[in-house]
Every structure is written in C-alpha cells, then in structure tokens.
Amino acid sequence: MPIPSTKQDQMDTFMGKTVALDSNRVIDDIAYTMRVENKIDDYTVLASESGTFFTTTTADVDFTLPTREAGLIYWFLAGVDDEIRVTSDTTQKMTTFNDAAAAYVEFTVDGEQIGCGFMVYCDDGLFWNVCAIPGLVTATMAPA
Amino acid sequence: MGKMPSLNSDAQIDQMAFKVNTSTKVADYTVKASESGTFFCNRGATAAVNFTLPAVASGLNYLFYGAADLAVTVTPAAADTLICDDNVAADAIALSTGSEIMGGAIQVVCDGTKWFAMTYLEESQTVVVTSA
C-alpha cells in the first residue's frame, strides 16, 4: 500500500534497507516514486506538496504557487487540450523565457496543449524558475 | 526531528516529497560531486558563467538554469564526454544567444563514462554545442 508523502516521518524499512547517505552526504542511487495529483479545478499548491507531478485531464486549470521557499519544485503537465497556467505567489518573482519578472506562464493554443507543461522550482534567491516542457516542438508558451 | 523517509516493497521511497538543493553562481564555478542533484542558476550575474562538471561518475546529475540574460555554459572536465544535439563527443553546451537565455535550462546526467545533456527550452531558444 503506498505511503503518502505526508507520512514520510515513518521509519519503514524493506529487508533491512533504509535511506542512507554516501561519502558525499548525498542519497546514493535514489529510487523513488513521484507523488502524482490530478486536478480538474483551479488549485493553490502547497509547500508540503513539493516534488509533486500535477496533471490536468478535463478542463482549464490555473495552479497558484505557494509562498516562495528555496528548493520547492513541482511539475505541471496537461493531459487534455485545455489551458494550463501556473501563477506565481507574487508578481515579478518568476523567471521564464526572456522575462525575469513574470506573473504567470501558460499554454493556451488549442491543438497544442496536450503534453505541454512546466517544471517550476524556487531558487535560493527566492524566484520561481520556470522550465517549459513543450508537448510539441512548435508549441507556443505565453509568459505574462 | 528525527524523521526518515519510508521504503515501499520495491525498496523505493514512495510518493517522495522533497525539495531540491539550489545554488546561485555569478562567476565561473567547478561543480562538486557532493552537489549532485543541485539546481544552479546565474541570477545576478554580470558576465557569462561557465560551470565545469566534476569527473564522470555514474548517477551524478545537475541542472543549470538561465536566470540572467548572460551565457550559461556547461563544460565536462574531460573533452569529448558530452552527449547532446546528435553529437556523442561534444565539449560543451551553452545557452548563449542574447534574449534567449532566461527561462532555458540544461540538465545533465552521467552514466559513468559520458554526460547526457537534456534541455528545457521554449520554442525560440537556442543552445550552442561546442565540439572540437
């Protein structure tokens, strides 16, 4: 039975294995499953959902990011030909294509939206950095 | 608080919630193996930034993000060890075309011999690959 990330404070092991650090103090050969959430309505993302892969499957969805905190990271992918938008928690703190002060990013062109999305992470300067994931090589992304 | 992640029956961290390590560099920087998994950016840079990768080791991975409109170049420690853009022996990859840098990212993963480069680009962003 999957253990939701909200229960990550439990110390379960498998055949005596647990997560360990290597000599560089990094988790070595990490194996994991992603937390995946489908949204059908506009949604305000939580900091505690960092690492989540959000999908849309039925309608336009506007995701609003949480208060900026270094290291937070999310994926947003459209599984339907409807608009997908990711909005910063505050204006002018989002970096995207040739724009260091965006308020939101979105894919809105019909016929191009399936498979489009964004990976968004917050850097140590407390900016949201957007990496576009075009479903089509020619997909048109719109920062604003 | 003494918390540890759990493992599922496949010995995987299940539905992992995590934050990434982030680092901003405004001058040339030699990346460390101990920084594997780090997302670097060049916010605030006043000149181009070259990131030199550490010696190859399987599983090392990094992401380099263009947050300022100045070149971000990723260079392996050894020549001919970068795979990208239909090239199995590239020497460097860069976001270096003015007005096309911000918002672009280059992610590299090492298989122990070569670095595999992936790019996150908007349709009109250019990456420049150097190969001797």
Image (tube, rainbow, N blue to C red):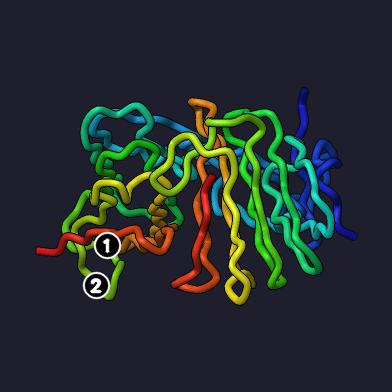
Q: Chain of mark 2?
A: B
Residue A109 lies left or right of residue B51; in this view the side is right
One can see residue B104 in this view: yes
Image position of A114 with respect to B23: above or below: below
Q: Position of residue A117 (x, y in %)?
A: 60, 60
Q: How many marks?
A: 2
Q: Residues within 10 Å of mark 1 (few under 14, many from 20)?
A: many
Q: Nearer the viewer, residue B1 or A81?
A: A81
Residue B117 falls in image quadrant: bottom left
Considering every residue shown, the one lying at the far left of the view is B132
Q: Residue at x 84, y 54 (%)?
A: A41
Q: CA distance from mark 2 to mark 1?
A: 8 Å
Q: Which residue is mark 2?
A: B87
Q: Position of residue B23 (x, y in %)?
A: 44, 31
| Residue B82: numbered disc | 1
Mark 1 lies on a secondary structure that is: strand
